[in-house]
Amino acid sequence: MLRRSRAMFASRRVWQPRLVFWAGAIAIGLVSVLFAKLADAAQHLFKLMTAGEGWNAWLPIVVTPLGFVACAWAAFVLFPGSQGSGIPQAIAARHLRDNEERSRLLSLRLAAGKILLTLVGLFCGASIGREGPTVQVGASLMLQAARWGGMAQARGLILAGSAAGIAAAFNTPLAGIVFAIEEMGRAYQARTNGLVLSAVILAGLASLGLLGNYTYFGVTDVTAAFPYDWPLIVACGVVGGAFGACFSLFALKASPRVRRWLAPSPLARTLLLAAGCGLAVAAIGLASGGLTFGTGYEQARGAVEGTPLPWFFFLVKFLAGLLSMVSGIPGGIFAPSLAVGAGLGSSLGLLFGSNVALASVLGMAGYFAGVVQAPMTAFVIILEMTGNHDNVIPLMLASMLGYGTARIISREPLYHALSRVFIADAVRRRRAEAAAQPA
């Protein structure tokens, strides 16, 4: 028995998959950090390019639509499958069993394209985030590692790569695990525990090694007082959930209409749609004094640290985020959604005469839970991003109220509804190929 154990321990068949898996998880952490740095640089360049009061302040009217068109063209022609957030693609890939079909949604080529086009979008002022794309990138890297390492658990590895991507993107390891359980794998299997935990730990270690330990939105130590602040908690949950559900509902209602409109001339109409959305995003950004361009990270962090946002910020950011999503360019909704939630919470805090920092954190929880209908992910990710461990119960309550309100307005979770489009495309393609084969 001992000799057999030693032989197995030294076997290449045993160690090769593990080494490749570990390398894949570390690569996710490294790529996520690089992606984050480049995304910040892209936003900074856009800000520098459009700063001032001269002619360059009007550059978004030209740069933003052209950037949208360039991203839409590249996503259609060069990187099909890279459109949108990236999370629906990862969910769809878990439901597909054919390797070729999965490769159309998760591959190294798509990962590179996703990063590149998200950066271009941020450089031209799109209201998008990098966190959803990081999920598709992480899942792609892990699936490729599975191919190289000869590992068979494709569904579990996609789940692990997605969780590692979220953990590394926000420095939120617990949120990565909860996201994998609640959002990515609604039929979660216990046997994937080790894969998810290992991937999150290794990707997190790689991220920590480069950036150190940090909280995404800084640290706030405000605490909800009972019973004074509890009306605010209820308002942030219910109102935030309602607005979040409206975002999800509008996106889901628009998706089939857009697809039908694109059908007669897909490429030409895709570019026309992108140009129109880009022009509208530019106009909103100029009208708001540049507040809605990019991820919204700076505005959200300021609100979490106690600086009130303009009362209209959450409305214009909501519109800019929705238009950026409908345009079909690659880019996520995580960070923009958190910014909308912070703006909504800030406005409610001013209305209730409450602490702005507390209201912003609660607003993020309610709105984000309403958008993605994943309350555990919402409160855990915000808890880790703000380091505000004194408000666990208020955050839970705001998230649950947001989720409950959203379920009344929009019954379908956004990412899972969008993932069915990719699954349907794969089934349609499979049937067309079968029909084309000779009898």
Image (cartoon, grey):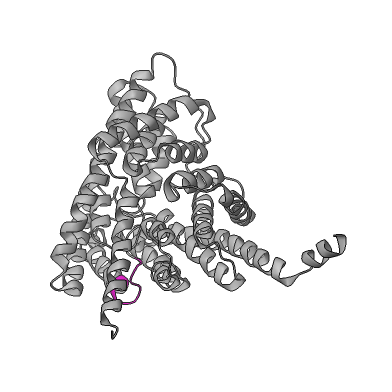
Q: Residue furthest bottom?
A: 438
Residue 430: in sight, yes or no? yes
Depth check: 62 or 241 in front?
241
Q: Residue farthest to the front? A: 439
Task: Specify start and end residues of the magenta stretch as a single range.
Answer: 75-82
Which quarter of the figure has residue 249? top left
Q: Position of residue 380 (x, y in %)?
A: 49, 38
Residue 427: percent from the left, percent from the top? 31, 67
User: Measured from the top left, where is residue 111 in percent x and y?
Assistant: 44, 68
Q: Position of residue 10 (x, y in %)?
A: 79, 68
Asked if one can make out residue 222 in the rendered structure from this viewpoint, the answer is no
Q: Residue at x 34, y 68 (%)?
A: 81
Residue 430 sits above or below residue 220 on the image: below
Q: Quadrant of the N terminus?
A: bottom right
Give the quarter of the image for residue 97: bottom left
The image quadrant of residue 30 is bottom right
- Assign the magenta stretch its main secondary structure: loop
Q: Nearer the viewer, residue 400 or 287?
A: 400
Q: Nearer the viewer, residue 51 or 72?
A: 72
Residue at figure coordinates x 28%, y 84% from the top left: 439
Q: Nearer the viewer, residue 51 or 362?
A: 362
Vertical position of residue 63 compared to residue 222: above or below: below
